[in-house]
């Protein structure tokens, strides 16, 4: 283990001891908010400490087994050699686990998200594909035990959606879905195609971490223009008689958000403000990414929607993620919501890149 890694662990071990002492302090225990924050931090560090203790124990076992290699008994030497090989393998695995636990954390990983899908090139077929993507993500959300709610939608003339925005509520939603941002392409024979020709259409997906009240996203009410209007769509007399829909324009940035799905103007305004906070937060994230000299290849959540990240080929039942050159002939499973088949490999590749960067700086 390199000295720089040991130094990082030394700092964490000291913090681990401090946290345990603070959580044993009677004065601290009388402050629920502080106890909660300290407990969360302790839980995050505990896994690192336990893994490091395992690594140290394996080092001791290796030293003992290595000493037996000098024993005059050939059988003991053979046994010791096998032990050393087994322990060295365990050390390698544990070190990789430690490095992974020490990777820089994305502060947005635990957030809820806004998932936006917009039909791109392809006309009606693109809108239908947007509907397919929406169903795929809803099934994934359901399988994760999360919740989702529709913020706004603009239906296509022949099915699907020209645009749809979904709010996803679930622990780690952003960490799991952040790599979905980008252009998704579909290749198939549309139902309206009489010649049997394969058409190519596209949709863009954007994953925005939801900002909450503790974020440093300051919104001056003087920078806002709020418009109300009569909502359209289902809703009966309530929709027809009241100006419940809300459109908010953030004048400095030009960002416009609107919501009409809730029954009251107050609810729509609250939802629109939440969306505005998310968009402003995303703008800050994008600004930071643009300042970096070299953006990470797999960090597609910066809003670059021109990048083709994935192709869904229906005739061949094939899905290809172009960022990691991954091809799976499991289109039915993936469209049915099993996108972990791709997400797991994207996450592994991203973490491998981070680990390589860490090694380079150590």
Image (spheres, grey):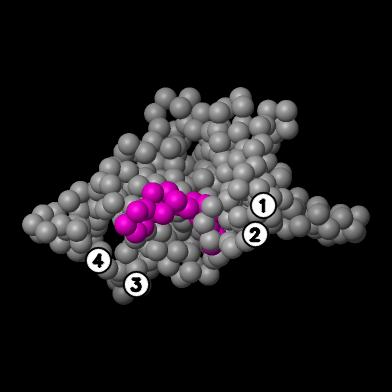
Are the residues tagged 2 and 1 within 8 Å (C-beta)? yes
State the image coordinates of residue 28 (x, y, percent, origin top left): 86, 54
Q: Is residue 14 above or below residue 297?
A: below
Q: Secondary structure at mark 4?
A: loop
Q: Please tell me which residue is depicted at 60% across the width and 48% down the height of the picture.
A: 230
Q: Which residue corresponds to mark 4?
A: 330
- The circle drawn on residue 79 is 3
**Between marks 2 and 4, how big is the CA–CA gap?**
45 Å
- The circle drawn on residue 242 is 1
273 or 177, nearer to the observer: 273
State the image coordinates of residue 112 (x, y, percent, origin top left): 57, 54
Sequence order check, earlier mark of 1 and 3: 3
Q: Please tell me which residue is depicted at 47% across the width and 42% down the height of the picture.
A: 2
Check residue 334 for magenta coloring.
Answer: no
First to last magenta residue range: 148-167
Identity of the residue furthest to the left in this view:
195
Sequence order check, earlier mark of 2 and 4: 2
Sequence order check, earlier mark of 3 and 2: 3
219 or 334, nearer to the observer: 219
- The circle drawn on residue 230 is none
Sequence order check, earlier mark of 1 and 4: 1
């Amino acid at each position: 283990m390199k000295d720089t890694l040991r130094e990082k662990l030394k700092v964490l071990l000291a913090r681990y001891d401090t946290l345990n002492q603070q959580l044993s302090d009677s004065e601290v225990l009388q402050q629920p908010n502080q106890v909660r924050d300290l407990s969360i931090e302790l839980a995050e560090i505990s896994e690192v400490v336990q893994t490091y203790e395992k690594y140290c124990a394996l080092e001791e076992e290796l030293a003992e087994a290595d000493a037996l290699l000098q024993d005059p008994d050939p059988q003991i030497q053979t046994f010791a050699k096998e032990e050393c090989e087994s322990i060295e393998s365990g050390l390698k695995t544990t070190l990789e686990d430690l490095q992974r636990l020490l990777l820089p954390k994305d502060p947005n990983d635990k957030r809820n998200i806004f998932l936006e899908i917009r039909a791109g090139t392809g006309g009606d077929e693109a809108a239908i594909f947007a509907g397919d993507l929406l169903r795929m993500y809803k099934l994934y959300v359901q399988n994760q035990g999360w919740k989702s709610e529709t913020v706004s939608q603009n239906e296509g003339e022949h099915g699907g959606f020209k645009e749809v925005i979904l709010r996803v509520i679930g622990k780690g939603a952003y960490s799991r879905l952040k790599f979905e941002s980008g252009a998704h392409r579909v290749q198939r024979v549309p139902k309206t195609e009489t010649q049997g020709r394969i058409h190519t259409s596209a949709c863009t997906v954007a994953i925005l971490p939801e900002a909450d009240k503790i974020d440093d996203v300051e919104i001056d009410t003087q920078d806002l223009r709020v418009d109300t209007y009569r909502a359209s769509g289902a809703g009966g007399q309530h929709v027809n008689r009241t100006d419940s829909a809300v459109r908010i324009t953030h004048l400095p940035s030009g960002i416009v958000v609107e919501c009409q799905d809730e029954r009251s103007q107050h609810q729509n305004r609250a939802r629109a403000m939440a969306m505005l906070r998310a968009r402003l937060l995303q703008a800050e994230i994008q600004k930071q990414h643009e300042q970096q000299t070299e953006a990470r290849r797999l960090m597609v959540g910066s809003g670059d929607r021109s990048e083709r990240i994935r192709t869904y080929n229906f005739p061949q039942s094939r899905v290809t993620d172009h960022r990691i050159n991954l091809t799976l002939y499991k289109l039915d499973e993936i469209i049915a919501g099993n996108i972990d088949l791709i997400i797991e490999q994207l996450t592994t590749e991203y973490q491998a890149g981070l680990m390589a960067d860490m090694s380079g700086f150590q």
